[in-house]
């Protein structure tokens, strides 16, 4: 039976070289984003240091999605080629024993040699957290945006569906490459409230640079009465520019990156763990 380019294959423990997918989680507060940068502490840089400690000699890992400085991740997808004869579970343990406390490898699985975490992805899901309080709350503000004046929850929930479907999101971000397309398909865009906190879940086939933080900022402006739902609709349908601004990075987390054969991966991974 034929398999897609990202379908999972279980390799023998004595395989000379295998491609592994890692699900990486990190607290972005003290990281300068996900991608390796010279003289700056990043998620990729810390992961590659841990890998080299256990014998990896590769040039660079492959990462599914870029996260900005201060943005968190619960499900960043990473791939690398590594000669490792001890199985995925022991690879995870070895990496976590060498990673700093603000990063952790949650899952390790062996995948097809041509698996590419960025280009094989079918969707990405982010979550943004905020709460309303006139007074600073240093603990909560590590992972959520403190907003004041308070937002109107009904307005938040009424504006979020505007982004659903395939649209030109040029008013909400810029392409990752110069001249790239700004068309994106959003499958989920919704706010929920629980225990005094609002959470925004958004899933799309891909995102523009800083698109999620821009979407959140615009929706908060609507919920505070500074913009109308109709203005946002015009920005989506006709790329009408809105007042500038971004939601802070610390409220944002990359929750998951999905792939065509992910159901099979979960089944196999239970056996591996």
Image (cartoon, rainbow, N blue to C red):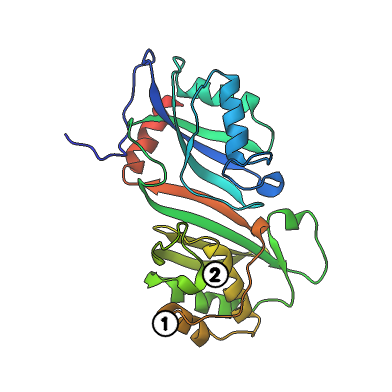
SS at badge 1 = helix
Residue under the image location 46 percent in, 24 percent down: 88
In the image: residue 265, left or right of residue 202: left
Between label 2 and label 1, give the one nearer the viewer: 1
In the image: residue 60, left or right of residue 247: left
**Residue 30's image quarter?**
top right
Q: Total label count?
A: 2
Instruction: Tell me the crowding category of disc 1: few under 14, some 14 to 19, or many 20 or more residues within 10 angstroms, Cα based.
Output: some
Mark 2 or 1, nearer chain start:
2
Q: Tag on residue 87?
A: none
Instruction: Tell me the crowding category of disc 2: few under 14, some 14 to 19, or many 20 or more residues within 10 angstroms, Cα based.
Output: many
Closer to the camera in the image, 108 or 48: 48
> With respect to residue 89, does 153 lie above or below?
below
> With respect to residue 120, does 247 lie above or below?
below
Image x and y of residue 98, in percent: 64, 25
Residue placed under numbered mark 2 in the picture:
215
**Residue 2's image quarter?**
top left
Farthest front residue? 178
Residue 200 in sight from this viewpoint: no
Image x and y of residue 80, in percent: 45, 31
Residue under the image location 32 percent in, 38 percent down: 264
Residue placed under numbered mark 1 in the picture:
238
Residue under the image location 41 percent in, 42 percent down: 117
In the image: residue 60, left or right of residue 138: left
Residue under the image location 68 percent in, 59 percent down: 144
Residue 179 in sight from this viewpoint: yes
**Residue 236's image quarter?**
bottom left
SS at badge 2 = helix
Tell me the CA gap for discs 2 and 1.
Answer: 16 Å
Image x and y of residue 229, in percent: 52, 84
Farthest right residue? 135
């Amino acid at each position: 039976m034929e398999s897609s380019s990202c379908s999972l294959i279980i390799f023998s423990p004595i395989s000379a070289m295998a491609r592994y997918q890692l699900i990486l989680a990190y607290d972005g507060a003290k990281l300068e984003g996900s991608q390796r940068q010279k003289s700056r502490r990043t998620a990729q840089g810390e992961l590659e240091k841990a890998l080299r400690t256990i014998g990896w000699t590769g040039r660079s890992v492959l990462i599914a999605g870029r996260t900005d400085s201060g943005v968190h991740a619960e499900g960043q997808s990473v791939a690398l080629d590594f000669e490792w004869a001890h199985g995925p579970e022991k690879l995870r343990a070895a990496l976590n024993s060498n990673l700093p406390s603000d990063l952790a490898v949650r899952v390790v699985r062996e995948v097809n040699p041509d698996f590419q975490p960025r280009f094989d992805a079918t969707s990405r899901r982010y979550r943004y957290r905020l709460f309303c309080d006139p007074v600073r709350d240093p603990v909560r503000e590590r992972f959520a945006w403190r907003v004041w004046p308070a937002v109107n929850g009904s307005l938040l929930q009424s504006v979020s569906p505007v982004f659903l479907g395939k649209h030109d999101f040029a008013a909400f971000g810029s392409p990752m490459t110069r001249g790239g397309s700004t068309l994106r398909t959003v499958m989920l865009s919704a706010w929920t409230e629980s225990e005094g906190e609002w959470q925004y879940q958004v899933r799309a086939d891909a995102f523009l640079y800083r698109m999620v933080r821009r979407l959140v900022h615009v929706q908060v402006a609507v919920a505070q009465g500074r913009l109308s739902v109709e203005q946002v609709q015009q920005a989506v349908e006709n790329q009408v520019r809105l007042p500038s601004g971004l939601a802070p990075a610390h409220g944002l987390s990359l929750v998951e990156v999905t792939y065509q054969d992910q159901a099979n991966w979960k089944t196999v991974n239970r056996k591996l763990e």
